[in-house]
Amino acid sequence: MKKDLKVTIVQTSLAWENADANLSAFTQKLEKTVPSSTDLIVLPEMFSTGFTMNASAVSETMNGKTVEWMAKTSAQKKAVITGSCVIKENGKYYNRLIWMRPDGTHEIYDKRHTFRMAEENKTYASGEKKLIVELEGWKICPLVCYDLRFPVWSRNKGDYDVLVYVANWPDKRIYAWRNLLIARAIENQAYVIGVNRIGKDGKEIEYSGYSAVLNPMGEPLNETKPNTESIETGKLSYYELESYRKNFPVGLDADKFKIE
């Protein structure tokens, strides 16, 4: 068990439906600003294309350039790297989060709640399984954007220490983003990492960022400035997490439920 976990969040604009431009930009950003001691690098949702419904034009396979770039970058930085991208598999499209390790092994999580207001539900197949991964003894649950609005899906039954959300969350609903991240941290007694993009996409939708690392009480450890390119590295303390849970064990009174 590593007592302190270092996490780097990357808030940036994205080139619309241009994987080559985005991957090149991320390579330059990560080379200059990510400390060598970081354990986890978190990128936004659909970090290689922006949040697009043009899946047939931008999708890749799991052997494509984006996953290959993640494997190469993870190995170079000696850190896990995660974010979602558009993947085609068995005739279906997925908004798929990749959890890439430095040794090239990986896990996947397909976004459970597809955003019907943008017709994401008509373009991408929904995931059916939640993912819990382990990093240096820490248990981490990575989710994607709209999943943030559904607390039952993210409810902690003692199975994770850190909740991660990668997103393309528009500025016009940023109040919800900021407050729901806080709520998820408090109700689950877990660290919460939320990474959002900035800039304007190909549909003229504006994004302001407000990425953050929150402690289990919902308090910010790291916050990015809105509308600003930013790479922040925060430290998560397992001792502080365990002490808080032990001294204030609200989970013992949690309601039992089953997801159908």
Image (tube, helix red, strand yellow):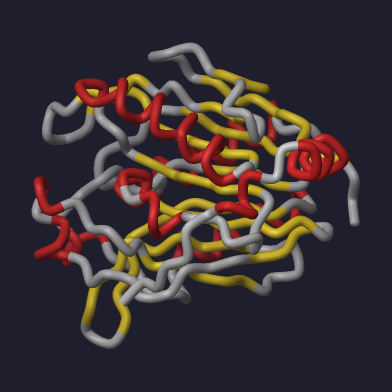
Report the front residue among 5 and 32: 5
Residue sticking out furthest to the bottom: 90
Query: Does residue 57 appear in the picture of this structure?
Result: yes
**Residue 158 location, x and y as percent?**
65, 60
Q: Nearer the viewer, residue 21 or 166?
A: 166
Q: Residue at x 71, y 33 (%)?
A: 34
Residue 217 image position (x, y, % from top left): 63, 29
* Rendered location of residue 116, percent (x, y): 12, 53
- Indicate the quadrant where residue 57 lies: bottom left
The image shows residue 130 at horizontal and vertical percentages of 47, 68
- Image point (87%, 40%), residue name: 239
Q: Relative to residue 134, is residue 163 drawn left or right?
A: left
Using the image as rendered, state which of residue 236 and residue 171 is in the foreground: 236
Q: Residue at x 32, y 64 (%)?
A: 112
Query: Which residue extends farthest front?
Result: 253
Q: Quadrant of residue 50?
A: top left
Residue occupying the point 31% across, 21% down: 175
